Image: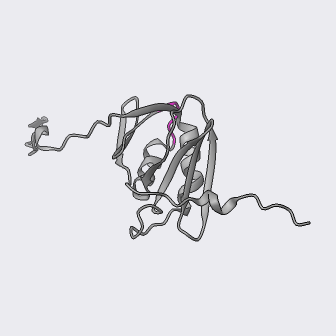
Amino acid sequence: MIKTKKSQIKLKSHPHEDFPTIPTVAGTSFEIEAKKLMEGIKSVFYSSSVSDIKPEISSVFVYTNNDNLVFVSTDSFRLAEKKIKVKGVPEISGILIPFRNISEILKVFGEFQGLIKVCFNKNQISFSSDDIYLTSRVIDGIFPDYRRFFRKIPPRK
C-alpha cells in the first residue's frame, strides 16, 4: 500500500519465493580485468553464426594457450581470433559461450571498470563483481579445429 496526501494505491505483487532462484555456479574460477574480457569478446563476437543450427559455431570459444586467454568465433565463412595476455588464469581446454548471451554480457559489463570473477563448470559459466551476477549455460559441443588450417607453409625453393 502506497499512500500520499491526495491518493492511495494498492500494488498487487507476488511473493519472492514464487520466482526461480538464480543458479550459483560452482567450479573453476579466476579473476580478470573487465577491460581485457570485454576486449576479447568484442574483438570476435561479430563473426559468430547467428543460426542455432550448429550451436558450436553460434558461440564464442574461449581457451587458454600459455599466458594467453584466446577468444575465437566463426560462422564458417569468416574467422576471428583474439589473444589477451593474462596471468593467473587456470588451464581452460575450451568453453563455448552462446552468441545470444554474449550481447547480454557486453551490455552488463561493457562500461564496467574493475575485476570480474569468472566461474565455470561443464554446464554453466558466471560473471560477477560487486552487485552484478550474470550466468549463462555453456554449449556442450566441440568447436572446429581452426588451427589446422593455419599451419606454416614452407617457402618454395
Q: Nearer the viewer, residue 5 or 102?
A: 102
Q: Is residue 107 left or right of residue 155?
A: left
Q: Is residue 49 left or right of residue 85?
A: left
Q: Nearer the viewer, residue 125 or 1?
A: 125
The image quarter containing residue 122 is top left
Residue 30 location (% of width, % of height): 47, 31
The image quarter containing residue 74 is bottom right
* Residue at 54%, 49% in the rendered image: 41
Residue 84 location (% of width, % of height): 62, 41
**On screen, residue 155 above or below 138:** below
Q: Quadrant of the C terminus?
A: bottom right
Residue 141 location (% of width, % of height): 41, 57
Q: Nearer the viewer, residue 10 or 86?
A: 86
Q: Is residue 146 left or right of residue 98?
A: right
Q: Quadrant of the N terminus?
A: top left
Q: Nearer the viewer, residue 81 or 91?
A: 91
Residue 96 location (% of width, % of height): 44, 52
Q: Which residues are magenta?
A: 111-116
Residue found farthest to the right: 157
How many marks on residues? 0
Q: Main secondary structure of the magenta part?
A: loop
* Residue at 50%, 40% in the rendered image: 92
* Residue at 49%, 58% in the rendered image: 143
Q: Is residue 13 magenta?
A: no
**On screen, residue 41 above or below 88:** below
